Amino acid sequence: KKSKRGNLPPGPKGLPLVGNVADMPKEKEWVTYAEWGRKWGGILSVNLLGQVMVIVNSADIMDEFDKRGAIYSNRPTLEMGGGLVGYDETLVLIPYGSRFRTYRKHFSRYIGNHGSPKPIQNIYPLIEHETRRFLKRTLGKHEDLMAHLRKLAGGIILGLTYGYEVQDGEDPYVNLIEGANDNFNASTVPGAFPVDFFPILKSLPEWLPGMGFMQQARSWKKDTLAMIEVPYEYTKKQIAAGTAVPSFLSTSLEDEKSLSADDIRDLKCTAASMYGGGADTTVSAEYAFFLAMVLHPEVQKKAQAELDSVIGSGRLPTFADQPHLPYINAVVLEALRWNSVAPTGVPHTAIEDGEIAGYFIPKGAMILANLWGMLHDSEVYPDPFKFDPERHIETTGKPAQRDPRKVCFGFGRRICPGMYLAEASLFSTVATALAVFDIESAVENGVPIVPVHENMSGIISYPKPFKCVIKPRSQRAVSLILDEQ
Ligand code: HEM
């Protein structure tokens, strides 16, 4: 009979002591993990200097982890990104425990949470308002699509969290989060900082060779603190002046006298987690949508035909139209499937020994869900690299393929708490942009540039930058964009 340890999920054979360190991919790890999945199955494991890392390539097995969420919802201790740069004060890296539950409750009551989408409806007017501002900016200078998308996502998240309205042109709060999120991605690259494997390094004198990471960490931590404090102070000032626009923070601080210092710290860090989590993620999904429209003009035409027949050309679509736009909703689902915002999710760790799919999962094991692999599994999504919204529409005798929302937002008690906000923002952008714009390939020297879809590395991943042309569909569309407040 095998010992428990002998019954770990299978995987590539490693070397003594270091295990599989040399086998680990340096970039686009999700592609290698999917290849390993084809060889070793839906669940496999590797050994990194004694640390067990379980890689899940099957959505059915991820469901098993999901069902036992209480055991599998801790986060690994990341010395660099967590303690040194300060992200372990925010929800994404905070350990499982009472502060984690407090943050999640705050998210739930304000923007909904797994299974309770209702609160998000209160945010619809803000999303519609910011989407209309986005249309105007894009009409003005379509070449700056990425900057406009950042401002759109920043406008929604800063509005709902702090009651702050982003400025046209450079906005200090949008820039602040952009910098902090870049730091998050850079400080959490697996294997980039030896201190993640040898925590003792952080106690060594800084004049020693190889200790430059400490200075880097201090500089990044300043940005993390600014992300937490600066917008919080903005809302506090507005409250004091009696000019605060209702927001997550202003309503949470209504009865401030009854709150303890810990309550206030948790509110501040929850707000920063919304701000941090809600900015880049949605931008990546929306940028991918524009790319998909360049690559698939036939999808664009079909979506526009639906909008024209349901809404006409006299007004812009709103959330009230959503139930009547099945093809647009399918485009939203396909954007979430086709492009992985978080290709390998965010790692979880096991709180105690357990068993999944017949394999032993030891306490402390890191669990990585290859979301990209699951969303591009040709058994579940035939022709997986094709952007094909029809796969999400049920027809007689042909059920819809697996709902990508069950995969792309992760699993267990760590499932993305911004999922309903993400979906609503994406719907609003897709529906309104297609109602008024044609999105086409850029042309250079008379030749259309055909972009490729490739995810860049990072916990939050973007499609590789591409060029496109976004032009109004008609003079009527221009008036609609300019008339809207
Ligand atoms: C298309 C957009 C988005 C995608 C695909 C996405 C995906 C994810 C994924 C895969 C995770 C990791 C879940 C896990 O550990 O299993 C996550 C976590 C998280 N997301 Fe999102 N997300 C999106 C938008 C948002 C938005 C709009 C917000 C904020 C309002 C947000 C806030 C967070 C936070 C705070 C966490 C950490 C949760 C925790 O550790 O408990 N996300 N997201």
Image (cartoon, rainbow, N blue to C red):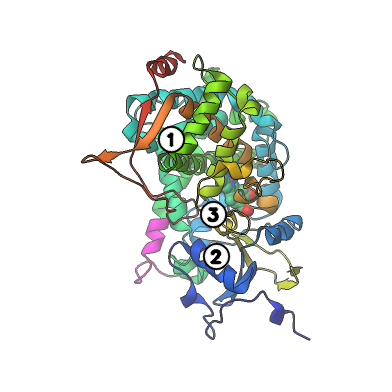
| Residue 271 lies in quadrant | top right
Q: Residues within 10 Å of mark 2 (few under 14, many from 20)?
A: many
Quadrant containing the N terminus is bottom right
**Residue 3 locus on image (x, y percent):** 74, 83
**Residue 408 locus on image (x, y percent):** 60, 49
Q: Nearer the viewer, mark 3 or mark 1?
A: 3
| Residue 78 lies in quadrant | bottom right
**Residue 88 drawn above or below residue 54:** above
Foreground pick, 13 / 171? 13
- Which residue is the extreme one toward the right? 1
Residue stretch rendered in magenta on the structure: 205-217
Q: Nearer the viewer, mark 2 or mark 1?
A: 2
Q: Residues within 10 Å of mark 3 (few under 14, many from 20)?
A: few
Query: For the image shown, how many numbered marks are present on the structure?
Result: 3
Q: Which is more N-terminal, label 2 or label 3? A: 2
Q: Which is more N-terminal, label 1 or label 3? A: 1
**Is residue 366 at least partly visible in the picture?**
yes
Q: Which residue is mark 3?
A: 383
Identify the disc placed on residue 34: 2
